[in-house]
Amino acid sequence: MKLVTAIVKPFKLDDVKNALELIGITGLTVSEVQGFGRQRGHTEVYRGAEYQVDFVPKVRIEVVVGEIDAARVVDAVVESASTGQIGDGKVWVTTIDEIVRVRTGERGEDAI
Amino acid sequence: MDTGDTAWVLISAALVLFMTPGLALFYGGMVRAKSVLNMMMMSFGALALISVLWVLYGYSMAFGDDVGGGLLGDPFEFFGLSSLIGTAGLEGAFAPDNLVFTIPSLAFVGFQGVFAILTVALISGAIADRARFGPWMVFAGIWATLVYFPVAHWVFAFDGAESETGGWIANDLLAIDFAGGTAVHINAGAAGLALALVLGKRRGFGRDPMRPHNLPLVMIGAGILWFGWFGFNAGSALAANGQAAEVFVTTLAATGAAVLGWLVTEKFRDGHATSLGAASGVVAGLVAITPACSSVTPLGAVVIGLVAGAVCALAVGLKYRLGYDDSLDVVGVHLVGGVWGTVAVGLFASSATTAGVDGLFYGGGVDQLWRQALGALAVLVYSFVLTLVIGFVIAKVMRFRITEEDEVAGIDGVVHAETGYDLASLGGGGGSALTAAGQTRAEARGTNLPTERSRV
């Protein structure tokens, strides 16, 4: 079982969600996050005084899938979230030891 | 007595009073979230204290008979204002015994009182985030007594109007300051600079971001100031007449032009026309036209406004170069704008207006110009020096500034035991475990909050 985590531009959330639905993903979690990478931050100017804002708003998407689906999810996210501009984000995959569906107590792949 | 004039002046007084809460919003939105309440409380503190001082002896110091040299009114002539109450009662249709021009003296008292409040409140923008509230209130009372009341006498007390003899700028120097470019704006701006120097910079000034936490509040505040300013300027005609209308239009024209001036300046300099720039341009234009609103044509007002917007937009950067922390730009907007507007009377005054004087550009030579410059300089120097002295004495006697630890934590919680916003509490701001714990403690201290426990 794998956890696919993607950090993408906020305006791409809808595209990514639709792309994941198309390949049959039935659930995901999103959160608003802030951070920086190569894009760094941006500057704001108040009464002529420049302020460097280090953190850029992003959306984090988390999807739990079986072994086989992880690669397809990564491809779908990369394809749908890409603009070719700096700051498009990252996707990474981690291995999960155990999953439990809280309502039924199902474990492992059955709980996905 | 003229009932129309009286109605207009009373309404104008209420408009000007509204400017101080407007200023509280304007300033409050510009500071960080952790000091918004303290910023607003400095304005409300001035509202409370100066109202009382004005009734006690402030009006008398400003508008009582001159005690010599045009420097100060007799503090005891109208002490407590009881001597001005007199009306002819029911039989005489409440006709007042005391008049200033065509309005009851007490209408004039109210109108001028709200000017005093606003001027004191304006200073607070220079010392955001770091002044203890008690010493601020002490400062406000002493400053009004030693600086504002005398300067209002110099500028606003005309011979034979409120009492027999008035102040030197109004009657001897004959500088034109219709609604308070010197007495209000240069006065507050110079005091703000002095007080910023006394208190020192905020921790992290010029290094940490100190972004305005709520620009919509700033915009609302600027709107209220603009609205109230029509009472400030047009009400200063003290009559519902052609001069009030003339002043209304010059005030409108200069303010619009100043917003354009500010926005164009920052568009070229920084690349963006900002909302803070628009709000600041409103105030810069209003400040600049305040002394000049009765003496320039509407076209002259447009030029004064354009220059005010551009010059103030550039002047607000001075504090970073010179290293003084005038936090919300009282100097850059009120001092610079006030000096410009006061001097501009000497340049743009036209005898086609109700002031009836020609400035340099209208063939009047430099006669009015030097009078304006001298009036501006006198108020600037007097206010700056006295404020330095008052500030240093208060700082010596009662510790004006909060500690560094408190400044980092936020002045609202430390000085007022409140926070401006409850945006992030667990459980949506109402029934969280943390809130319930807080209510339990309030109950234990004898207050009657309706907690879950008290209902059980």
Image (spheres, rainbow, N blue to C red):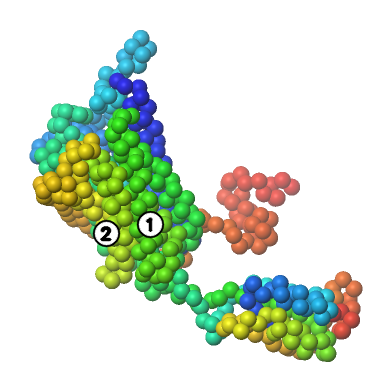
Give the residue displayed 84% in from the left and 79% down from the top.
Answer: A24
Is B438 left or right of B187, judged from the image as shown?
Answer: right
Between residues B141 and A91, which one lies in front from this camera angle? A91
Q: Say what secondary structure mark 2 lies in.
A: helix
| Rendered view: B188 above or below A75 | above
Is B114 left or right of B63, judged from the image as shown?
Answer: right
Question: In this view of the protein, can residue B384 be seen by the observer?
Answer: yes
Q: Which residue is mark 2?
A: B193
Q: Are marks 1 and 2 on the same chain?
A: yes
Give the residue displayed 31% in from the left and 70% down from the top.
Answer: B320
What is the quadrant of residue B165 in the picture?
top left
Please provide percent x and percent y for residue B43. 39, 48
Mark sitting on residue B151: none
Give the residue displayed 90% in from the left and 73% down from the top.
Answer: A104
Between residues B335 and B210, which one lies in front from this camera angle? B335
| Rendered view: B223 above or below B311 | above
What is the quadrant of residue B48 in the picture?
top left
Is B43 left or right of B165, judged from the image as shown?
Answer: right
Work out whether mark 1 precedes mark 2 in sequence or the reverse, and give the earlier one. Answer: 2
Give the residue displayed 33% in from the left and 29% down from the top.
Answer: B240
On what subunit does the disc labeled 2 rest? B
Task: Inspect the image, locate mark 2, and give the three-letter code of the amino acid beneath it.
Answer: Leu
Q: Quadrant of the C terminus of chain A?
A: bottom right
Task: Inspect the image, locate mark 1, and give the three-letter code of the amino acid beneath it.
Answer: Leu
Please provide percent x and percent y for residue B205. 36, 70
Question: In this view of the protein, can residue A7 be seen by the observer?
Answer: no
Q: Say what secondary structure mark 1 lies in.
A: helix
Q: Which residue is mark 1?
A: B260
Gap between marks 1 and 2, in whole Å?
27 Å
Neighbour tally class for label 2: few under 14, some 14-19, many 20 plus, Cα within 10 Å = many
What is the quadrant of residue B246 in the picture?
top left
